[in-house]
Amino acid sequence: MPFQPPLPRAYAALSREALDERISSVRAAMGRRLVILGHHYQQDDVIRHADFTGDSLKLSRLAAAQADAEYVVFCGVHFMAESADILTRDEVAVILPDLSAGCSMADMAAIDQLEEAWERLEAATDATIVPITYVNSSAAVKAFCGRRGGACCTSSNARRVLEYALTLGEKVLFVPDQHLGRNTACAMGYDPAAMVLYDPAAPAGGLTDDQIERAKFILWKGHCSVHQLFTEAHCDAVRAADPECRILVHPECRREVVLKADLTGSTEAIIRILEEAPDGSHWAVGTEANLVNRLIRLHAGRKHIRSLAGLQCLCTTMYRIDLPHLAWALDELAAGRVVNRISVDPRTRHDARIALQRMLDHADGPPAAG
Ligand code: SF4
């Protein structure tokens, strides 16, 4: 993970109002030259300053559409800023206010592990394997997929991308989120028996040649440390306490949780489903805490929304982007200094862009998992 040096001490002494004021004044001075993108999992203090908010897919499209911007400040995590750098013009500087804002899931698939896995799989079968990476992965992993006829996907379009992949080859290697891969393949009608789990830490991936030969989907052993916190017991407790309550979860949750839920949807789908839900309805939502708390406030007095888990399932790396870091990055910009620029090397950028473009080309379709 890149090192984030401590901020100048003055920022720790600034009040929330003073930080807000600094951020607003830089935004006003820079006008359309500056665009701030905010992921839905960001804290409220930060999201208030975003020009656009969204999930990974929406923000990738928005980054690609910025015609006038010279600077894109990405309030999200490292892989998202890399995707923005890949999709924007060369002249656009993409800035991540805190370099230590990474993603534990993306870190579970290192490029050397993926290259080793690919050799292992190719040695085990003559079938054509199409590598698909969830967008929550490094630029190097995306580039690997782009070079080998594969693509990226998000939780919004995973199903559509997997359907596309199976028109190109007989098997899919899905990296790095086993749960999204499994939930999506099951929603497409495949039996879990058609899936095997590749463990990058185990000798030979923990699979025999025969298991690889028989599998339709080879799922990488990775997960989101936030969504993996939701359990079947949480679903049972909600049902026992409130039989009227509908359970809505993200497809990064385990299969057992998805099976107990009433509905599964990407971040954007969760927002839409709750928007369209009738007044008086009851919901327990299994996704990141900042988003759930925002939805609770947004629908307060009309819809009864709560987190599926009693505990706060917070993305702690996303949480590193806070007001002081945002104010600091913008102050530096106003002083003519670009800090924390995320820059992907040209070759990786070229190949990763192919994979991202295939993702954008398959952006609309049926839900990721059901
Ligand atoms: S919520 Fe999970 S997948 Fe999303 S950025 Fe945080 S750790 Fe990564």
Image: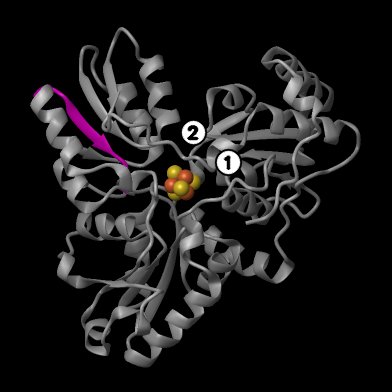
Q: CA distance from mark 1 to mark 2?
A: 9 Å
* Mark 1 secondary-structure assignment: loop
- Give the percent coordinates (x, y) of residue 120: 40, 86
Quadrant in which the N terminus appears: bottom right
- Give the percent coordinates (x, y) of residue 274: 31, 25
For the stretch drawn in magenta, the main secondary structure is loop
Residue at 60% over, 45% down: 101
Residue 245 included in the magenta stretch of the image: yes
Q: Earlier along the polypeptide chain: callout 1 or callout 2?
A: 2
Q: Nearer the viewer, residue 93 or 44?
A: 44
Residue topped by disc 2: 40
Asked if 292 appears above or below 369 in the picture, the reply is above
Q: Determine crowd level at label 2: few under 14, some 14-19, many 20+ residues with C-alpha closer than 10 A.
A: many
| Label annotation for residue 76 | 1
State the image quarter where residue 220 is shown: bottom left
Residue at 91% over, 37% down: 336
Residue reaching furthest to the top: 301
- Give the percent coordinates (x, y) of residue 305: 28, 21
Asked if 215 appears above or below 228 in the picture, the reply is below
Q: Give the magenta range.
A: 242-251
Q: Determine crowd level at label 1: few under 14, some 14-19, many 20+ residues with C-alpha closer than 10 A.
A: many
Look at the numbered disc 1 and say if its residue's Cβ is closer than 8 Å to ligand 1.
yes
Name which residue type carries label 2: His
In-image side of 91 versus 44 (left or right): right
- Give the percent coordinates (x, y) of residue 258: 21, 46
Name which residue type carries label 1: Gly
Q: Nearer the viewer, residue 86 or 80?
A: 80
Q: Is residue 336 visible?
A: yes
* Mark 2 secondary-structure assignment: loop
State the image quarter where residue 134 is shown: bottom left
Q: Nearer the viewer, residue 311 or 244?
A: 311
Asked if 343 appears above or below 194 in the picture, the reply is above
